[in-house]
Amino acid sequence: MEKKILYRFFEGKASYKEEEEVCNWTEASEKNMQEYLKERKYFDLLIVQNRKSRIRATSSSNVFYLNNIIKYAAAIAIFIICGIQIYNHTKPDVSHLEMNTISVPVGQRVNILLSDGTNVWLNSGSKMKYPASFTKGKREITLNGEGYFEVTKDTKRPFVVQTDKYNIKVLGTKFNVDAYDKTSFFSAALMEGSIQISEKEELSNSIVLHPLEKADLVDGKLVIEKIQNYDIYRWKEGLICFENTTFNDLMKEFEKTYDIQIINGNKNLDNYICSGKFRVSDGIDFILQVLQRDISFRFQRNENNTIIYIK
């Protein structure tokens, strides 16, 4: 793969044909994927260093916003990892640590490696704040949205995910958190290890999750139950998986994924429960056409392709 094509891809300036070429190339072999990640890390390091050199003269702290994350067309075969690594050499004992902010545009996903080696996937519309370098005594980040965490184990420095309603404390584990500030919904699911979930206003009110358990906020209380379907947490793989989901809740998920407004004017669909699995790259039109095979409805877009009307 020519580097000039890769760099245009990273900058969001590649043509549709070049985007498809990069996607097919990374899928071809593990070696290609590793080369892609290597070039991506080098590209991001150059960007960060350039920004630091411009800002250092006027400010001692930087906030990096990902306003132009790699754009993929819906027809592309797979949503490739956007590997973004932030390198920082600030000493851990300084009084004012540099803070980074990542804002994921609607319809996109981002993969980031934190300074301690923790791997984080952020879903569409999510925002995360984190220090460029963790201090000796703690590892804390703030999340508004949905994230999947693979936390590097460090018994001396617990890892804490702060959300609008709850704090999640771990040592080393894999778990998913769905906690968008703009909604009343909260859910945490544990794949490995253990996590402690505490109320922000009353830290003594806490629960502990064990592997393959999840906690959902129901009527103001956290309800623990076993994870019945792991597929719903595979969004980081570019999949939309749903089981026993109402039609209206599924449309909300599509709005988040495809950055489009959906207006359901068909009352017959209010009680429709559906299950299925699709790739994000299938596109919303294809998915709706598949759903039409099970229940009768029509849909059309407005002239600007910003709204889908269900009839």
Image: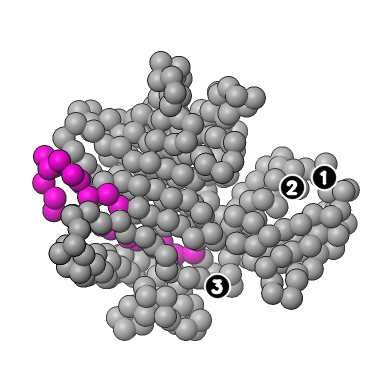
In the drawing, does residue 306 fall left or right of residue 14?
right
In the rendered image, residue 142, in percent from the top left (x then y), is placed at 38, 41
- Crowd tier of the residue under label 3, counting other residues whose Cα lies within 10 Å: few below 14, some 14–19, many 20 or above: few
* Residue that mark 3 sits on: 73
- Crowd tier of the residue under label 1, counting other residues whose Cα lies within 10 Å: few below 14, some 14–19, many 20 or above: few
Which residue is at a point 74% across and 76% down the rendered structure image?
303
Q: Which mark is residue 210?
A: none
Query: CA separation, marks 2 and 1?
Result: 7 Å
Which residue is at a point 84% across and 55% down the rendered structure image?
265
Amino acid type shown at disc 1: Asp
> Are dots 3 and 1 in contact, CB under 8 Å?
no
- Crowd tier of the residue under label 2, counting other residues whose Cα lies within 10 Å: few below 14, some 14–19, many 20 or above: some
Query: CA separation, marks 3 and 1?
Result: 30 Å
Any part of residue 42 in sight:
no
Q: Which mark is residue 270?
A: 1
- Nearest the eye: 45 or 241: 45
* Residue that mark 2 sits on: 248
Label located before the other in sequence (3 or 1)? 3
In the drawing, does residue 251 fall left or right of residue 135?
right
Question: Quadrant of the rendered structure where residue 18 is?
Answer: bottom left
- Does 95 appear in magenta? yes
Residues shaded magenta: 79-100
Against 26, residue 258 (above or below) is above
